[in-house]
Amino acid sequence: MRRCKFCGSEAYVQLRSPRLAMCEEHYKEYVERKVERTIHRYKMFRKENKILVAVSGGKDAIAVALTLHALGYEFECLHINLGIREYSEYSEKIVRQQCEKLGVPLHVLYLRALVGRGVGELKTRREVCSYCGTTKRYLMNKFAWDNDYDVIATGHNLDDESAFLLGNVLHWNTGYLARQGPYLPGGNALVARAKPLYELTNYEIAKYVALFDMNLTTEPCPHAKGAKSILYAKVLNEIEEVSPGTKLNFVKGFLKNRELFQEEPVELRACRVCGMPTLREVCSFCRMWGVKEELKLQVEHLQDSEQHDEN
Ligand code: AMP
Ligand code: ZN
Ligand code: ZN
């Protein structure tokens, strides 16, 4: 039987990089300390900041909420109901259970109520996952901006980030590379974005979340991600098997060299409809959803319109 390195009791988890066996209690502490170190290392936020955690119902987003809660940060959560019929209803239900259990305030935005349609119902040449991503990022940012949050924390983890990095290196998407990283500072109507799980793998996060009695979404999105990012993650896992620590070295090495990909800052202007920064006259969100008037996402405003809906 493996024993915990710190207390000698039965090990709950055995990591390969670093080589470390830990009991439940010490593992919990290990993960939370690692998240705290990540937050400090990349200067993501402080206790006094107004923090918004974007929650999907999956293990990663709730792991952000659980670790921040354990570390004594105050925050609120945002869930975006993307209007993907049963899938979105199911995800929202799980998120509501999670936030109630944790005792943190939750805000929910309904894409269908805001733009009249859901993800999957748009006629465009773009792939569903791609415009869904744009939609989520826009709504997260607009909500955070309208309600004066300092930072948005998401559940992106080391597996996501290293797979994304590999894909972008293979195709030398230097523009994407310049904008990738654990912390993207805000400015110009963009709220800062932070990825506190940047240095934790899927496995480490799943083992952490399993220590809590939390329901998680297990159904994949019906529009599930392109096979490519899954392939990149799989390849990286195979390499990691042979040389543990590769994924972390890959993203950390990239961060040291990120300046190589920096581009001339581009001139952004305000979207004619919503005022958010864009390269064109109308931003991609307003353009693709045919939005004609700025969506006002102030909490007071949303509550008013919800009350109107019920009448
Ligand atoms: P994904 O792009 O689905 O891999 O999700 C990455 C992160 O984005 C998650 O860990 C969440 O923090 C956030 N996120 C994804 N979907 C939603 C959603 N429907 N509502 C709020 N946040 C989300
Ligand atoms: Zn122990
Ligand atoms: Zn716009």
Image: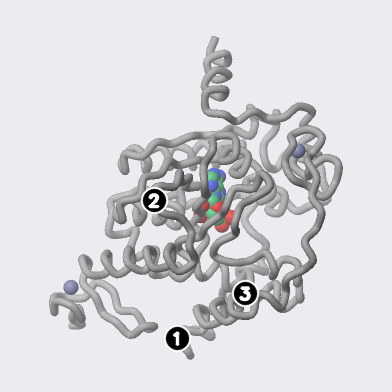
Cα separation, mark 1 vs mark 3, equals 16 Å
- The kind of residue tagged 2 is Ala
Image spot of residue 205 (x, y percent):
39, 64
The single residue placed furthest to the top in the displayed view is: 311
Looking at the image, residue 310 lies above or below residue 68:
above
The residue identified by callout 1 is 244
Image spot of residue 236 (x, y percent):
56, 79
- The kind of residue tagged 3 is Tyr
Helix, strand, or loop for circle 1?
Answer: loop
Mark 2 or 3, closer to the camera: 2
- In-front residue for pair 86/289: 289
The residue identified by callout 3 is 232
Cα separation, mark 2 vs mark 1, equals 27 Å
- The residue shown at (49%, 52%) is 153
Q: In which quarter of the image is residue 177?
A: bottom right
Helix, strand, or loop for circle 2?
Answer: helix
The residue identified by callout 2 is 65
Which of pointers 2 and 1 lies earlier in the amino acid sequence? 2
